[in-house]
């Protein structure tokens, strides 16, 4: 897997953001049995920048914790079989499946870790897992979808022993 990490703001966490994101992303892809090597672009930014992206891309005039921009639309969440016919989903140079972009607000990671009473590591890892599931077609628009996604996120963090404090 290739993780392209861009830090647009200071990430003064006590852990290596690249290493944690890479572990979480690989765990999601392994759990979902993704048969391809994949690439994801992750940008760490602040509330001002994510607010602007949220406004431009989604028409929502506020900052948010995380945004996901999938490169491929999955007809069925987590099922990769259809990709054999989707050559546009693969990087022509590396052959890797281009999953998309994730943007995380470092400001929100800090605030939400305090609000939810858990570590920065747990909040960051949760947001990465959450976005990875979006990139492979999962959503939480209905209660049923939300329940599936929440269970998957919880299982990934448990598998990685990144639990609430």
Image (cartoon, rainbow, N blue to C red):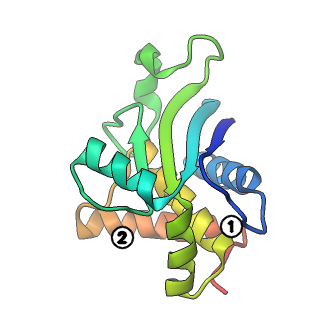
Taking the image as drawn, is residue 78 in sight?
A: no
- The vertical placement of 158 against 94, above or below, is below
Residue 41 lies, in percent from the top left, at 57, 37
Q: Are there few (<14), some (14-19), or many (20+) residues within 10 Å of tag 1?
A: few
Distance CA(mark 1)–CA(mark 2): 18 Å
Q: Give 65 or 32, whichever is nearer the viewer.
A: 65
Q: Residues within 10 Å of mark 2 (few under 14, many from 20)?
A: few
Residue 126 appears in the picture as rendered? yes
Q: Which residue appears at 56% of the width and 18% of the height?
A: 91
Of callouts 1 and 2, the N-terminal one: 2
Q: Which residue in the protein does label 1 denote?
A: 159
Residue 22 position within the rendered picture, expressed as x and y whole percent measured from the top left: 70, 48
> Taking 138 as reference, is 146 above or below it?
below
Q: Residue at x 45, y 30 (%)?
A: 81
Q: Where is residue 135 drawn, in percent x and y? A: 44, 43
**Above or below 33: residue 113:** below
On screen, residue 55 versus residue 155, left or right, reads left
Give the residue at x 71% y 66%: 160
At mark 1, the secondary structure is helix
Quadrant location of the N terminus in the rendered image: top right
Task: Indicate the quadrant containing the C terminus: top left, top right, bottom left or bottom right.
Answer: bottom right
Query: Secondary structure under badge 2?
Result: helix
Q: Is residue 35 left or right of residue 59?
A: right
Asked if the residue at tag 2 contacts the one at tag 1, i.e. Cβ–Cβ closer than 8 Å, the answer is no
Q: Nearer the viewer, residue 93 or 47?
A: 47
Label 2, on which residue? Answer: 147
Determine the image quadrant of residue 72: top left
């Amino acid at each position: 897997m290739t993780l392209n990490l861009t830090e647009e703001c200071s990430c003064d966490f006590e852990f290596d953001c690249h290493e944690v994101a890479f572990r979480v992303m690989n765990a999601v892809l392994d759990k979902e049995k993704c048969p391809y090597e994949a690439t994801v672009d992750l940008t760490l930014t602040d509330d001002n920048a994510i607010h602007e992206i949220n406004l431009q891309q989604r028409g929502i005039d506020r900052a948010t914790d995380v945004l996901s921009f999938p490169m491929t639309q999955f007809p069925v969440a987590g099922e990769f079989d259809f990709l054999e016919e989707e050559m546009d989903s693969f990087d022509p140079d590396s052959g890797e499946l281009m999953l998309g972009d994730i943007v995380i607000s470092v400001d929100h990671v800090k605030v939400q870790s305090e609000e939810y009473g858990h570590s920065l590591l747990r909040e960051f890892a949760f947001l990465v897992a959450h976005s990875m599931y979006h990139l492979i077609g999962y959503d939480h628009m209905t209660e049923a979808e939300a329940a599936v996604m929440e269970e998957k996120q919880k299982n990934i963090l448990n598998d990685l022993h990144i639990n609430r404090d």
